[in-house]
Image (cartoon, helix red, strand yellow):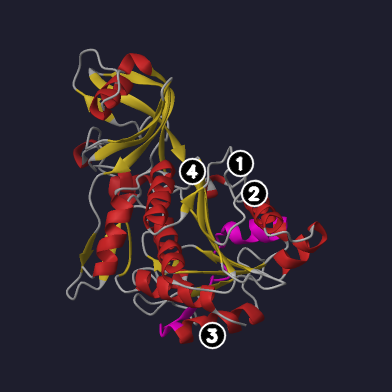
Amino acid sequence: MTPYLDDLAEFIHTSPTPYHVTAQVAARAAEAGFTVVHDTVDDFPTEPGGYVLVRDGAVIVWHVPENLPEHPTFRIVGAHTDSPTFRVKPMPNNTSAGYNRVGVEVYGGVLANSWLDRDLGFAGRLITEHGEHLVHTPAMARIPQLAIHLDRSVNDGLKLDRQHHLVPIVGAGGEANIIDEIAKHTGVDPAEVTGFDLLLTDTQPPATFGINEDFFAAPRLDNLVSVHAGLRAMLETESDKITMLAAFDHEEVGSETRTGAGGPLLEEMLTRILSAQNMPGHLHRTIIAHSILLSADGGHLVHPNYTERHDADHRPQPNAGPILKVNATQRYLSDGRGAAKFNRWAERAGVPHQVFVSNNNQPSGSTIGPISATRLGIETIDAGIGLLSMHSAREMCGAQDPQHLSKLASAFYYDQS
């Protein structure tokens, strides 16, 4: 892999949950000289420089330049830290036909069949009186598929009951407490665990493949590829704007949480930053309205086996650059003015670019873009890289496209207009 993909692969593999993502982002920003701001402090930083704040599964990274203009604006890359998966239930231990199993709840729009017959681990956080402990286990679970001999019609259409068929097995009998086992693996006394937030995670590491290594495969490309690209661009780009990476949790389940894009976090941070720079309160809304949010999230590559599901004139290809996402019903917010800016950034970055529009017979997905724009009144452009197998346990993209996106984000941050 290229050095950029090596770095992305490491970032993804060490970030199996939103809590790990935010910890990774904060650590990388701190290593680059950014100051960690604790969510509980009253003394908000006023000096120019870089800062990072974590709130559970959400993280805000920002940089205030020296000699801030009289009328500053923000350049924000927005992304999300969560991905479709399975969440461990509060009372997880159960048995069936002599097997030890773990009760899980579906999180987000999973491609459920993609989780079958994979070596799965657990990741998240354990809560004790001494604090929170990040967890990332090796393979401990599997959701085995029923043999074809017991369901001869399976290839006519697999139907999975979420309550009964998607329960991972972790043992072959006897007493078992999965939380205790996870705690022991993490070096935490099981007796001290008072709470937990745990997810299933695929243990297969990211990799390139294809006859010319054209493709990159990994879990959680939607949307860690955008978090990584936005962070890399922020740490490598100087700008006279206030630059920001805003990565939210819970996008896959609607964003209406305290750490989701529908919550107060971004608006709160923008106003606190402006207040810290002594910007009069009556100008805050005007400054935000003249700022730009680049909502970076996964888009759809044309699928060669299902070309009829795509618009015939808009078929994004792998390694052909970031995708501008357009939708007439405003599920994506890119308009003509936004398209002109997107094209300019891509051209200045020296990367190819393309456009995605849904087939009229296929409903469109959405992003944090419309949610943030509605809450803030900020100009928003939806973009990202194209994926195949979106929402699978293991997604894929063109191997060149992640770095293309980061270069475009750098041009976005630097743009002087």
The amino acid marked with disc number 1 is Thr
Give the distance between the C-alpha atoms of the residues marked 1 and 2, in whole angstroms: 6 Å
**Residue interval drawn in magenta:** 349-375
Q: Is residue 392 above or below residue 136?
A: below
Whole-percent x, y for residue 386 in the image: 41, 69
Viewer-closest of 406 and 91: 406
Disc number placed over residue 344 in the picture, else none: 3
CB within 8 Å, label 1 to label 2: yes
Whole-percent x, y for residue 124 in the image: 38, 36
Q: Secondary structure at mark 1?
A: loop
The answer to which image quadrant residue 43 occupies is: top right
First of labels 1, 2 by sequence position:
1
Give the distance between the C-alpha atoms of the residues marked 4 and 3, in whole angstroms: 33 Å
The answer to which image quadrant residue 318 occupies is: bottom left
User: Which residue was labeled with disc 2?
Assistant: 262
Q: Residue at x 29, y 50 (%)?
A: 13
User: Which residue was labeled with disc 4?
Assistant: 57
First of labels 4, 3 by sequence position:
4
